[in-house]
């Protein structure tokens, strides 16, 4: 008889357990997860602060069963410091009744020390005799790969937007400046082809000088555009070699001798000896060409440009100093931002603004340095640093 009563009690207890399990399963169904495939299930007892983990959750972090203490804090302390507060607040909001479901996303440290991204969602399934939350059950998803793909897409979109913005700026400037210089050349040549204009020798020389300046300006625009296009497509890579910087400077000066003569500018080149540096010679040639071209462009007739060098134990510094129109503080700050913008020279020379953009980029590729000093009405000094050979 006693045995019958014991069996009846065991059956009653079993029925209660079944009802509890059915209620728990029903509560889980009501969570209405929108993700396909769960990583692992967890159960948190709010009274004991103990957590039961599905092995899949531990495996995702690189742990075997038993390697993480069931204490809640052994897990939450692995949450990334930048995500910890919002993750804890999400749980508090649900327990306090502010939110019907606990839901959050956080980065969590794995056994190897790197981080994965989890999406976590759960709900209270059990209350104590006083109506206080006692057990929270949830499901966690590893969305690391998904977030990585999203970040890559964001970076790609940002890069495309910047490239598109830069391309639009360049096309806008080129459509004005390049057409202007070529149009000026065409108009001046027309004067020579029509005898009715009967130009004096002095006028012819002046027009020839103007044609030369416009042609040099157009060539500089095209060279910078070509370099920018190749560089933007990743086709320009720094090929380091040892070369003589003095030869590069002399080559650029020689190329611009007609412009120098037409504007009556005195070039004081103090680089008389050979100075060997390490870098990509073609890139540095483009850098030096743009620095000297800018000095010529913004220096008035009969002005002066001084090219000098200095060095320390590892770096050779090249300075190009002019006594041209200079820049005020606002303009100086403006050119320190990588934005393409055209500015007319002292003799109407045009440009795309790509020069300084390329100077910065090419120096970066050559582990070089750039400093610009300027005072409005007094001139500009540009200083670059290159690794000594």
Image (spheres, rainbow, N blue to C red):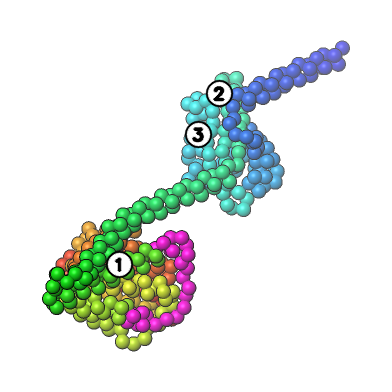
Q: Which residue: 48% across, 73% down? A: 239
Q: Quadrant of the image for the N terminus?
A: top right
Residue bearing the label numbered 1? 218
**Label 2 environment density (alpha carbons within 10 Å; few <14, some 14–19, many ≥20):** few
As rendered, which of 361 and 108 lies closer to the eye? 361
Q: Which residue: 58% across, 31% down? A: 34
**Image height check: is 118 above or below 46?**
below
**Could you say where residue 247 lies in the image, as x and y percent from the top left?**
36, 82
Q: Secondary structure at mark 1?
A: helix
Q: Which residue: 48% across, 40% down? A: 85
Nearer to us of marks 2 and 3 is 3
The CA span between labels 2 and 1 is 79 Å
Q: Which residues are magenta?
A: 228-251
User: Which dot marks residue 90?
Assistant: 3
Magenta segment: does it hold 280?
no
Magenta segment: does it hold 232?
yes
Task: Give the mark nearer the N terminus: 2 vs 1.
Answer: 2
Residue bearing the label numbered 2? 132
**Could you say where residue 33 lies in the image, as x and y percent from the top left?**
59, 30
User: Which dot marks residue 270?
Assistant: none
**Is residue 297 visible in this depiction of the protein?**
no
**Image height check: is 124 above or below 362?**
above
**Could you say where residue 57 lies in the image, as x and y percent from the top left?**
65, 41
**Image height check: is 52 above or below 331?**
above
Q: Which residue: 46% across, 67% down? A: 236
**Could you say where residue 353 lies in the image, as x and y percent from the top left?**
30, 62
The CA span between labels 3 and 1 is 62 Å
């Amino acid at each position: 008889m006693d045995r019958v009563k014991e069996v009846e009690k065991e059956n009653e207890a079993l029925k209660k357990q079944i009802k509890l399990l059915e209620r728990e399963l029903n509560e889980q169904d009501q969570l209405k997860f929108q993700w396909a495939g769960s990583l692992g299930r967890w159960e948190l007892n709010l009274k004991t602060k103990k957590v039961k983990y599905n092995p899949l959750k531990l495996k995702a972090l690189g742990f075997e069963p038993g390697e993480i203490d069931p204490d809640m804090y052994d897990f939450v302390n692995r949450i990334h410091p930048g995500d910890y507060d919002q993750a804890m607040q999400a749980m508090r909001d649900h327990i306090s009744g502010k939110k019907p479901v606990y839901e959050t996303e956080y980065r969590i440290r794995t056994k190897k020390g790197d981080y994965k991204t989890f999406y976590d969602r759960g709900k209270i399934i059990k209350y104590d005799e006083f109506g206080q939350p006692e057990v929270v059950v949830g499901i966690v998803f590893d969305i690391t790969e998904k977030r990585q793909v999203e970040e890559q897409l964001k970076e790609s979109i940002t890069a495309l937007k910047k490239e598109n913005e830069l391309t639009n700026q360049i096309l806008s400037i080129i459509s004005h400046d390049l057409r202007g210089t070529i149009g000026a050349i065409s108009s001046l040549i027309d004067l020579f082809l029509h005898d009715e204009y009967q130009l004096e020798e002095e006028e012819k020389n002046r027009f020839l000088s103007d044609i030369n300046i416009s042609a040099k300006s157009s060539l500089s625009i095209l060279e910078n555009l070509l370099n920018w296009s190749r560089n933007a497509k990743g086709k320009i890579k720094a090929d380091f070699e040892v070369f003589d910087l003095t030869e590069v400077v002399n080559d650029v000066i020689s190329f611009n001798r007609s412009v120098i003569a037409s504007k009556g500018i005195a070039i004081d080149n103090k680089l008389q000896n050979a100075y060997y540096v390490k870098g990509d010679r073609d890139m540095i040639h483009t850098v030096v060409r743009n620095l000297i071209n800018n000095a010529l462009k913004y220096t008035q007739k009969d002005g002066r440009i001084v090219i000098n060098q200095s060095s320390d134990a590892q770096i050779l510094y090249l300075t190009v100093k002019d006594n041209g129109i200079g820049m005020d503080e606002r303009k100086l700050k403006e050119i320190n931002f990588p934005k393409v913008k055209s500015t007319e020279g002292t003799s109407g020379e045009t440009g795309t603004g790509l020069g300084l953009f390329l100077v910065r980029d090419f120096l970066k590729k050559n582990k070089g340095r750039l400093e610009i000093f300027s005072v409005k009405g007094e001139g500009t000094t540009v200083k670059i640093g290159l690794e000594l050979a």
